[in-house]
Amino acid sequence: MTDVLEAVPPRPAKIWLVTIAVSAVSMVLGVGAAGGALYLAGWRQPVVREFRVWAALKTDVTEPQKAAVRAELGRIPATDGVKYTSSAEAYARTKELMESQNMTAYLEGLDADSMPQSFELITTGTEFRCAQLAAVRALPGLSDVRVTMVPTGKRPGGPVAC
């Protein structure tokens, strides 16, 4: 008597499991490749920076002119509002800074009357839009307006040309 072993057909693979696994791996690799390509091409999340706006007033500025400058600067979104610095406060701050750096020789001839009154504010954004200063620059009683980018730990600051 001969024993004949019947060949058992192989169990059919669950093709749908393999299809889902291959699709999932392909999607993960595709997303990673696309993200890497965008990063290498220079695409980055825009960095939000702080910008300091400083407006110096003329020595003969009147109270209505000063109020108009403050009101117009108040239209710029600021983190802490618009701050006023009198001539005496500006002189005291300059004197303190010069003394702390042993530069008292530069204080000769300076007094509180030689320092300008000013307004200052800090605004944030990915860039500074100079158009928002157009109305401020047109006001009488204003001597100078400057905008600087505030330095951070990783990025330098500097003047903004407006």
Image (tube, helix red, strand yellow):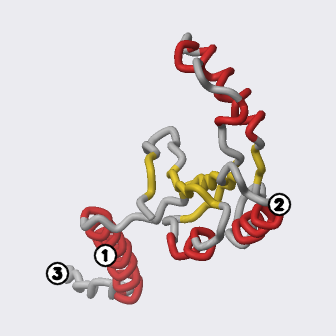
Judge by depth and name the residue closer to the eye, 85 or 101.
85
Q: Mark 2 or 1, which is nearer the eye?
A: 2
Q: Which of marks 2 and 1 is nearer the N terminus?
A: 1
Q: Position of residue 131 (x, y in %)?
A: 52, 76
For the residue labelled by badge 1, is the local secondary structure a helix, a strand or a loop?
A: helix
Residue type (three-letter) at the residue carrying disc 2: Glu
**Cα–Cα span, label 3 and label 2:** 119 Å
Q: Mark 3 or 2, which is nearer the eye?
A: 2
Q: Where is residue 154 in the image (x, y as percent from the top left)?
A: 45, 41
Q: Mark 1 or 3, which is nearer the eye?
A: 1
Q: How many numbered callouts?
A: 3
> Badge 3 is on which residue?
2
Q: Do the residues labelled 1 and 3 touch (CB within 8 Å)?
A: no
Q: How crowded is mark 2: few (under 14 residues within 10 Å), some or many (20 or more)?
A: few
For the residue labelled by badge 2, is the local secondary structure a helix, a strand or a loop?
A: helix
**Cα–Cα span, label 1 and label 3:** 57 Å
* Left or right of residue 11: residue 91: right
Judge by depth and name the residue closer to the eye, 84 or 29.
84
The residue at 51%/66% (across/down) is 128
The residue at 72%/31% (across/down) is 112
> Badge 2 is on which residue?
63
Relative to 120, residue 78 above or below: below
> Badge 1 is on which residue?
30
Relative to 146, residue 96 above or below: above
